[in-house]
DNA sequence: GTCTATACACAGATAGAC
DNA sequence: GTCTATCTGTGTATAGAC
């Protein structure tokens, strides 16, 4: 009971390193353009060794998605202790966090189109579990915010949820960053404004 | 002067058919997952014949992008005659048109990440010309709308422009469509609302 | 479980006859 | 310009030694 757990710990550490690399490469190039050779080179092990830990490229990507969802859940846990904030403030905080992750180059982006990856994800229990949990927690805040009239009650809850997810990997962020005219903090404030307040003036 | 123009006309018609196929496949699967074999099969000609018209897969995609930009310009031309509409109304009309194109499965989607396609596009004169022209026309309306106070003057013009482009291929549209709960018209109205008015209530 | 070497499939692009 | 047949590179995945 002393040696085996240690070995497993080492194994876990290596797998964490793999998933972290996958996460970064996925954010940088997307699933289709990321190659398993690159991942292996980035981690510093042979490609065949990768396949001892993960059975396919799709499983690698799924692990990275689980990782970011668990980071999100950890962030949500931290927010819950902040009881005096309104639901709207909580949702804004989550959106801000997601944009920060994206600016840091750590937001893995999935192909919105159909692909081999989608097929794996829709049957990937752990991924679906985490996704559900994040959705449920956000959904509760959305409902509360709509009851308070902080978020437009005329909008379907799922639309609000999808919109928040979509803004977490909005290409507009990358375009503004590329322009080089604004710093990261300003970019995030601008995108939060367009997301929650829209393009029109608030008279 | 009678036979040659006719042959060129036939040639042009065939190329139009090719580009239309590419456009549809690009909207359906994206650049990376679209194969040249598929395009050839869809058009009904041999792959080698395709390469007589277009020198590479990237050039095929570029032609499809030019096509959709020219459709946009044609739509903008039609709007200009409508002189009594406000700049904000004009911008909304363009956004609505783009969403309709996306719902029809005719909005080619480029990979936002770096790829071989980006490298070709940034040096593709015709594509850049069309893109500039669309941007200029929208930019004029954006400026006018901000001067009138219809669009928030605090937002940088480029942010507004990028946001409109991004909403034209927003994945949220596809998600709502997939849910099956709303018809196309309602989906468009909902997305226009979140784009221009934001998620928050307008008290 | 890690490595080197390799099998296998597929996609982009081309050769050469007609 | 269109076809059939083929070349070439590359990427996923695996075999087999250690």
Image: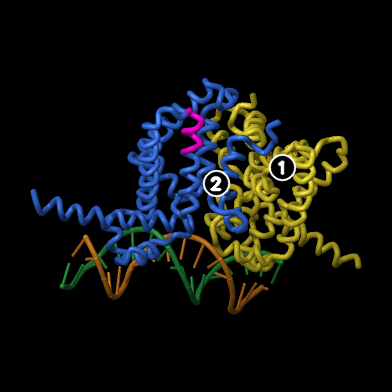
Chain colours: A yellow, B blue, C green, D orange
Q: Position of residue A39 (x, y in %)?
A: 61, 56
Could you say where residue B139 lies in the image, as x and y percent from the top left?
A: 46, 29
Q: Which one is nearer the viewer's eye here, B110 or B203?
A: B203
**Segment colored magenta:** B86-93
Residue at the (65%, 63%) spot, across then down: A121
Q: Is residue B123 left or right of residue A74?
A: left
Quadrant the C terminus of chain B occupies: top right
- Residue A161 at x, y percent in the picture: 69, 48
> In the figure, residue B163 lies in which quadrant?
top right
Which quarter of the figure has residue A75? Answer: top right
Check residue A153 in the rendering and tell me which mark sits there, or answer none.
1
Secondary structure category for the residue under label 1: loop
Residue under pointer 2: B188
Residue at mark 2: chain: B
Q: Up-down: is A93 above or below B86?
A: below
Mark sitting on residue B101: none
Taking the magenta stretch, the answer to whether it contains residue A39 is: no
């Amino acid at each position: 009971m002393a040696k085996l757990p240690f070995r497993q710990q080492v194994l876990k550490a290596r797998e964490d390193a793999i998933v972290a690399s996958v996460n970064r490469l996925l954010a940088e190039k997307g699933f289709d353009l990321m190659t398993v050779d690159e991942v292996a080179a980035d981690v510093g092990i042979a490609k065949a060794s990768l396949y001892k830990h993960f059975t396919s490229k799709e499983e690698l990507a799924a692990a990275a998605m689980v990782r970011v969802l668990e980071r999100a859940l950890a962030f949500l846990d931290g927010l819950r202790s902040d009881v005096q904030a309104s639901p709207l403030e909580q949702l804004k905080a989550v959106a801000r966090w997601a944009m920060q992750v994206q600016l840091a180059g750590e937001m893995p982006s999935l192909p919105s189109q159909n692909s081999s990856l989608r097929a794996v994800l829709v049957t990937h229990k752990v991924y679906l579990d985490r996704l559900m949990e994040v959705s449920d927690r956000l959904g509760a805040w959305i409902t509360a915010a709509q009851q308070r009239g902080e978020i437009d009650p005329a909008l379907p809850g799922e639309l609000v949820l999808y919109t928040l997810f979509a803004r977490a990997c909005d290409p507009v962020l990358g375009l503004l960053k590329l322009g080089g005219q604004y710093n990261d903090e300003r970019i995030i404030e601008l995108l939060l404004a367009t997301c929650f307040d829209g393009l029109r003036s608030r008279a």
